Image (spheres, helix red, strand yellow):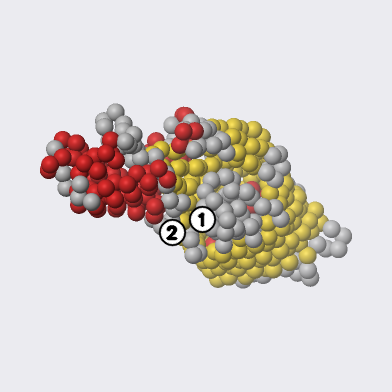
Amino acid sequence: MTGHRLTKLSVAIGLSIATSSVLASPQSFMSARSFAMGGTGVAVAVPADAPAENPAMMAADHHSWNDDFGLTLPSVNVRAADEEETVNQVDDIQDVIDEFDQLVSQLEIDPTQANADSLALTAGDLRDRLVDFDRDTMRANAGLGLALAVPGKSLSVGVFTNANLTATVRGELSDDDQALLDSIVTAAETGNVTNVENVINNAAVDQDGNIIFNSRGRILASAVGEVGVSFARQFDLSNGNSFQLGVSPKYVELRTFQYTESVSGFEDDEFDGDQYQTDKSGFNLDIGAAYSFGDEKQWNAGIVVKNLIPMELDSAASRPELGEEVRTLELNPMATVGIAHKSEYHVVTAEIDLTKKEAFGFEDDTQWVALGAEFDAFRYAQLRVGARHNLASNEDNDGIEEKTQFTAGLGLNIVGVRLDIGALYSDADVGAALELGTAF
């Protein structure tokens, strides 16, 4: 499975999701601006981003050039972590298995012509690759979003839809495979072909006579999709400050994918077969609030609670003989608070998740604390930086750790057309975001 096929995997998940409804992953969707500012947005979201980040911010005070109308069409972001090049190991292992099968076939056809040294080397190579493959993990995240917002002090209205997925791939070694290959190497190193034949004759074979290897590759993917409307209103207080409330009723669909196959037969493009996936849908609700204060309303605090109605979905387990177990995807209420300081030329913000998101696939639990900043050049260009740290990162997790991530990005506004780009880097992850839109 090459890097190109990894891209096909992410695209295929997204396409299969989009054919039934608009979907997203359990991680909340991020605009390109939020992506570049460390994932922040609860206290600083602009109108077009507010439905996905904090609906109350649609009614908050913004720059005069983006407080009347906002359109995002579209916003895309991706992240990937593959420390051990897991997705490339599968093809290499399959090539070695093919070579091993040819040598075994030659031994069965004419033992006198069999090359015990080659068989020992190939069996040892295959064993070492399977050992290296064990517990190696790849994680990919991808998102797609659309939004329209019409802000107003008395009533702000927005519509949104977003798509985001998390897919993980993992290798698992079978102890039986390691023991078998150890025996073949030991027998072949004696130079006695009969010893090798005795070991191979005791191994399980498929209908083509090839030895069955039970080491396996797994794909675990989760998706949650939402499409909804947002409403927000601002309330002016007697002390001159203002308070905003927002709500986003939405339709949500959850989907899981669990595909497990022996490493010799593993094909990433088969993961979305009907027998490997489950889905569930229903209505849900986000609610948010924001409060502007200070002599010039230069401070803003925000809080959002997403997915007020808990939802859960069990995965399929079509291959119990390969160790598959039913896993539960949980969409629980998630609360985040933030505070920001702003002026005509800058925004600095900090926020923290009050709740932890438990991992579904081979990934880390997450609970982020984040810092973000934006520096504005006369509305035509914005420079953004950010960082976030995962308070829930656990060395004993079942996948790749997510610890501290650093982000940066750039926004350009030309004749009302907006282009935002973002980048992310950590010890494990690299990522990018791109967004087109307009605001005035």
> What's the residue type where badge 2 is placed?
Glu
In the image, 269: left or right of 186? Answer: right
What residue did someone put label 2 on? 83
What residue did someone put label 1 on? 400
Within 10 Å of the Cα at label 1, are there few (<14), some (14-19), or many (20+) other Cα atoms?
many
Within 10 Å of the Cα at label 2, are there few (<14), some (14-19), or many (20+) other Cα atoms?
some
Q: Pointers 1 and 2 in contact (CB under 8 A)?
A: yes
Give the number of marks. 2
Q: Nearer the viewer, residue 70 or 219?
A: 219
* Residue 296 visible in this rendered orientation of the protein: yes
Question: Residue 217: image x %, image y %?
Answer: 42, 43
In the image, 88: left or right of 21? Answer: left
Question: Residue 135: image x %, image y %?
Answer: 46, 51
Give the secondary structure at mark 1.
loop
Give the secondary structure at mark 2.
loop
Q: Nearer the viewer, residue 85 or 380?
A: 85
Q: Residue at x 50, y 64 (%)?
A: 426
> What's the residue type where badge 1 is placed?
Ile
Q: Residue at x 50, y 42 (%)?
A: 221
Question: Residue 212: image x %, image y %?
Answer: 34, 37
Q: Residue at x 42, y 44 (%)?
A: 174
State the separation of the CA atoms marked 1 and 2.
8 Å
Among the two numbered marks 1 and 2 on one chain, the one whose residue lies closer to the N terminus: 2
Residue 410 lies, with reference to residue 164, above or below; the image says: below
In the rendered image, the residue lying farthest to the right is 238
* Residue 92 visible in this rendered orientation of the protein: no
Picture quarter with the C terminus: bottom right
